Image: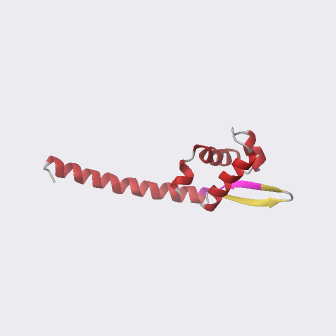
């Protein structure tokens, strides 16, 4: 999941979908410095991690951001950060001899 979000182009694709709503790969490619096939590869990766969903409308495939998955990921990252913060505070107290 984090690897999918770490790529700048995938992050930009996700931002475009979140801000502008449902779009085709062709339309997304028009807003990015990469080709349509490259955008499709990024969309597939995002879809594998359930960050993006798609639906067929005639001959086109429309992609949209999956806000619930983004919220779930943000909550998980917040919990990890809280755990690390507590661990670092304990380590600091031990290092300073106050713990």
Q: Is residue 64 magenta?
A: yes
Q: Is residue 70 above or below residue 28?
A: below
91 or 3: nearer the eye?
Answer: 3
Residue drawn at (39%, 53%) of the image: 81
Q: Residue furthest left?
A: 97
Q: Main secondary structure of the magenta part?
A: strand
Q: In which quarter of the view is residue 28 placed? A: top right
Residue numbers of the magenta segment:
62-67
Scheme by which the image is coloured: secondary structure
Residue drawn at (70%, 48%) of the image: 39
85 lies left or right of 29: left
Residue drawn at (28%, 51%) of the image: 88
52 lies left or right of 55: left
82 or 14: nearer the eye?
Answer: 14
Q: In which quarter of the view is residue 34 placed? A: top right
82 or 24: nearer the eye?
Answer: 24
Q: Quadrant of the C terminus?
A: bottom left
Q: Is residue 66 above or below residue 16?
A: below
Q: Is residue 27 magenta?
A: no
Residue 76 lies, in percent from the top left, at 46, 59
88 lies left or right of 51: left
Residue 20 lies, in percent from the top left, at 70, 45
């Amino acid at each position: 999941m984090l690897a999918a979000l770490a790529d700048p182009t995938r992050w930009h694709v996700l931002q475009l979908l979140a801000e502008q709503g449902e779009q085709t790969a062709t339309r997304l490619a028009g807003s990015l410095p990469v080709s349509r096939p490259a955008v499709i590869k990024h969309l597939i990766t995002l879809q594998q991690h359930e960050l993006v969903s798609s639906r067929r409308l005639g001959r086109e495939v429309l992609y949209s951001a999956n806000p619930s998955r983004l919220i779930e990921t943000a909550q998980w990252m917040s919990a990890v950060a809280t755990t690390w913060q507590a661990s670092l505070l304990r380590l600091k107290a031990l290092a300073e001899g106050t713990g």
